[in-house]
Image (cartoon, grey):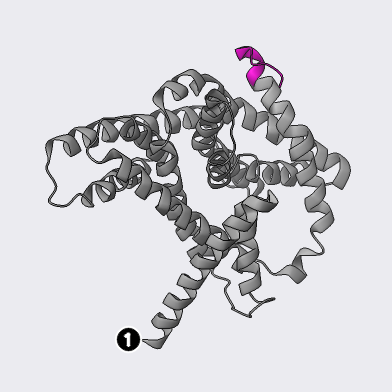
Amino acid sequence: MNTTVTVALALGAGVVLLAAVALRLADRLGLPSLLLYLAIGVALGESGLGIQFDDAELTQNLGVAALVVILAEGGLTTRWADVRRAIGPGLTLATVGVAVSVAVTAGITVWLLDASWGFALLLAAVIGSTDAAAVFAALRRLPLPRRLAAALEAESGLNDAPAILLVTTLAAVLTDAAAGAWWLVVLQVVGQLVGGAVVGVVIGLLGAELLRRVALPLAGFYPLATLSLCVLAFATATLAWTSGIVAVYLCGVVLGNAALPHRTASIGFAEGMASLAQIGLFVLLGLLVSPPRLLDALVPALVVGGALLLVARPLSVALSLVWFRWPWP
């Protein structure tokens, strides 16, 4: 066997085992496990063990694949009764909440850092949506009320389409490329969400019926088939120019609430694959980090992050949920 492949396998196995130990440590210290995975990547990188890795395109592609698995697991473990009560707040947070968060963060960035409005809006749009991997990982360990947890899950599964279209539009404006009118952007957002939802629900329903009717030769094929259906929903929706993120999440919700053969085993398999995807994703992101280059950006990053965390996000949540009569706590 090729020595490089052997070393890569050994390194990968070591990272997964180390991440498992780090997860136990994170639970004891009360730290987010994803932060420790990121730290492992930094420790392995150029300023640690010296592994040289700067392939951003590969990281992006692998990151998308990891996100698909994470969202599929999130959908499979979501109860339909909770989603039904939380879909309104979740959808509002994913649209109105993102818009308010971007506007407020950009305004504070212009005010405190003297940045241009174009740069500030683009920066705010990039960080305006919550990270599904982090949200699902946190919700797995936080004893939150089911309606609140379901709203957060729905928001994380739906907010990528509005945020991506907003970033694309702002980038086109800043580079003098062709950019559509604001109402066209709104129509694109609605079309992406609705189209992705239709694809995800249809594939979920057809897939559930297929798994109930077809007797697979091995029980272990059912978890693989269930996860594969979620991945198929993502690919189909993306090729149809709709939101693959919405499709994979809703396909998971449909399958997770259907009476499937070996359902418990399928959900357990998805949880394991999602954990592996989280480890790989954040270790790769850590490998991309060059700590010496972060010093110059530290103060602006803290200002923007603080504005998002302490002002923009709470305000966007309050304005989004006031219509649903949610209690302030």
Q: Is residue 282 above or below residue 242?
A: below
Q: Is residue 46 above or below residue 203?
A: below
Quarter in which the C terminus is drawn: top right
Note whether residue 153 is visible. yes
The kind of residue on which mark 1 rests is Met
Quarter in which the N terminus is drawn: bottom left
**Picture coordinates of residue 145, whole percent (x, y):** 57, 26
Furthest residue to the front?
28
**Picture coordinates of residue 17, whole percent (x, y):** 50, 66
In the displayed structure image, the side of residue 241 where residue 311 appears, left or right: right
Q: Is residue 170 above or below residue 253?
A: below
**Picture coordinates of residue 81, whole percent (x, y):** 42, 21
Magenta residue span: 321-329
> Mark 1 Cα within 10 Å, few/some/many (few <14, many 20+)?
few
In the displayed structure image, the side of residue 79 where residue 299 appears, left or right: right
Picture residue at 54% right of the left edge, 32% below the top: 155
Asked whether residue 70 is drawn in magenta, I would say no
In the displayed structure image, the side of residue 46 where residue 274 appears, left or right: left
User: Quadrant of residue 101 in the image?
Assistant: top right
Q: Nearer the viewer, residue 186 or 143?
A: 143
Picture residue at 25% right of the left edge, 47% below the top: 225
Note whether residue 106 is visible. no
User: Quadrant of residue 116 in the image?
Assistant: top right
Residue pointed to by mark 1: 1
Picture residue at 59% right of the left edge, 45% below the top: 172
Total tally of numbered discs in the picture: 1
Q: Secondary structure at mark 1?
A: loop
Asked whether residue 324 is drawn in magenta, I would say yes
Q: Nearer the viewer, residue 236 or 309?
A: 309
Q: Nearer the viewer, residue 289 or 74?
A: 74
**Picture coordinates of residue 5, whole percent (x, y):** 39, 80
